[in-house]
Image: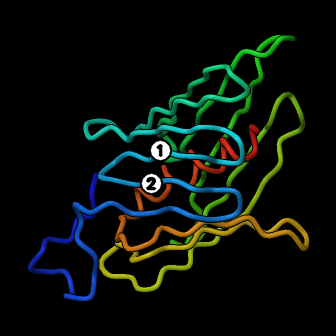
Amino acid sequence: MTPKLLKQDRPDSWPRQDSYSDVRGTQIDLKLHDNAIAGLVRDTILFASKSLDHPSMEIFLKINGSMGKAIIEETREGALEGTLTHPTPTGNAITVVTNRRVEGDLKSFLLEVQARGGNPVSYNVSVLPDEELDGVWKNPRFRIEIGEKRIEFKVVNMAIDQTFARHLVTAIFAVYFHN
């Protein structure tokens, strides 16, 4: 869903909700419009679209000439879960991802990724918006730190609500770690 702020409620300095936005970061170069993203995550082509009717996001990816897909859905407990798969010469590559809210902290998520049969690894995702108003973040940056390494991306010139942000984070980082 596009951000909840109505035009008359939004400060003049905030971007238009019907505009296109860039999503750029560590080996991440995407376009965002409405409820859809498309572009590159590492060397994978990604297209994802969030449902307007259901708390889910459908993901399509093309990696090494093979097509893959996933659906990220909200569980009864409020987590987002999905399984990315794509065929390889030796069988299917599978990555399972879960995104949970951190109790009492609206600006972080706990992302658990089990990439290609490895052990599950948990990452804390920090949210750093330029501004925040009524559950909507302007130009948010999403960051994972792994030791000294930082993986991050920023939504440029766009305000997004926290629900869409969770789907966006889950889709992008799932593809990032699947690769």
Is the residue marked by circle 2 packed among few (<14), some (14-19), or many (20+) residues within 10 Å? some
- Spatial CA distance of label 1 from label 2 is 5 Å
**Front-most of residues 11 and 88:** 88
The outermost residue toward the left is: 8
Q: Position of residue 175 (x, y in %)?
A: 66, 41
Q: Which mark is residue 11?
A: none
Q: Which residue is mark 2?
A: 31
Position of 13 with respect to 119 (left or right) is left
> What residue type is disc 2 on?
Lys
- Please, is residue 71 above or below residue 141 in the view? above
Relative image position of residue 84 (x, y in whole percent): 64, 29
Residue on which disc 1 sits: 38
Residue drawn at x 26%, y 63% is: 19
The percent position of residue 154, horizontal first and vertical second, equals 55, 69
Which residue does the image show at 14% across and 80% down from the upper left? 9
Of the image marks 1 and 2, the number of the one nearer the N terminus: 2
Secondary structure of the residue carrying numbered label 1? strand
- Tags 1 and 2 in contact by the CB under 8 Å rule? yes
